[in-house]
Each structure stands twice: as structure tokens, then as C-alpha cells.
Image (cartoon, helix red, strand yellow):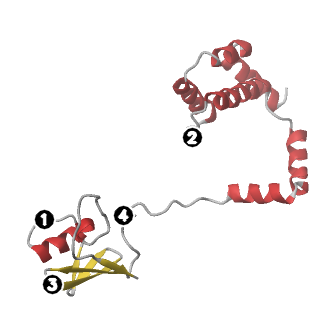
Amino acid sequence: MTQLNARATVARRDLGDVPTRLAALLEMTVGDLADLYLSLYGEPTRSRNRDYLRKRLAWRIQEMAEGGLSQRAIKRIAELGDNLPERWRMRQAAAEQPITPPPTDRDPRLPPVGAQLRRIYQGTPHDVTVVEDGFLYQGQRYRTLSAVAKLITGTAWNGFLFFGLTKPATVSDASSPAVSS
């Protein structure tokens, strides 16, 4: 008995009756399907589409019970891979490239590093420079715009609101702040 057939026999025994398992997929909730996906594939699913999960799980149950694709089929797929149309290869190459998420530690409301924020408050201009880890105001580094706004006004302010990075519909201020890069 080959190793592939031995694995299939063990999987078939572990899975029980394949038609019964496939029929049970029709009664499962999305949460149950996701749990089963995790146990059969060893990784969580990103999909919450019931039909998609049923198809993937049905394939996996049958694959585990019957042994999956033959070595000959896998070899043929690899051979045909070079003969794919160009647009398919481009799509496949794009899917294989890792997607790096944007940094999450920086507030998306902030202008880019190096930008100058200007606010005229009580007739005096106040310039703040955006730096990587905070803000520069009069030669001092501050972690938040709110700290700079409090220093300027003497009262607690939302820094984004004070420097015009967030504009509520009800607030109208005669001195309009400006942002430049």
C-alpha cells in the first residue's frame, strides 16, 4: 500500500461517512463552517460567504477521504503553469506578492512629516512642524497637537480641531488655520 493510499485510508476512517459529512454542511451556520474550516485547513478563513465555505469544505473532506490529486495531476498542473495566458500570470504574480498594510500607529488625519501647521490665535501666528514622533513648536518637541494647543491657549483643546485638521459643521472661527507642506 502506498503512502498516499495509507493516508487516505486513515483520513477516511477519521472523517466517517463522507456523504453524511457533506450533507451536514448544508445545515451548518457560517460560524460552524468557519470552525470546521479551521480544523480541516489548519488556518482561519477570511470569508464569511456560506456557499464558498461549503464548497471549500466539501472539497477538503473529499480530498482527505480520497487522497487528493495524484502526483501525475500535480506535475501536469506545474507544466501548464508556464503556458498560462499573460493576464493570468500577471494576476497570479500580483496575488503572490505580500501586501504590506499601512502603518497603523500614525493617525490618518495628520499631514505628512515635515508639513507646517499655522494657527493665528489672538492675533499671534503659531507655527508647528509635523515630525515623525510628534510636533515641534518653538524649539520644543510635543507628543500631541492637543498639548501644543493647550500651551497656546491655556485651556484644554482638541489639537486637530484647533489647527483645523478636523472641522465640525457647527464651529465657525474667524481665524482660519492653514496647512502647507
Q: What number is the disc on residue 123?
A: 3
Which kind of residue does numbered mark 4 sit on?
Asp
State which tag comes first along the sequence, 1 or 3: 3
Q: Quick check: 70 left or right of 161?
A: right
* Cα distance in 3D space between marks 1 and 4: 20 Å
CA neighbours of label 2 inside 10 A, class few (<14), some (14 to 19), many (20+): few
> Can the viewer see residue 104?
yes
| Residue to which mark 4 is pinned | 107
Which kind of residue does numbered mark 3 sit on?
Gly
- Up the image or down, 59 lies above or below 139; here it is above
Q: Quick check: 134 left or right of 151?
A: right
Q: Quick check: 54 left or right of 79?
A: left
Q: Secondary structure at mark 3?
A: loop
* Cα distance in 3D space between marks 2 and 4: 26 Å
| Residue to which mark 1 is pinned | 156
Residue at figure coordinates x 76%, y 21% from the top left: 9
**Position of residue 87 measured from the top left corner of the image (x, y, whole percent):** 82, 58
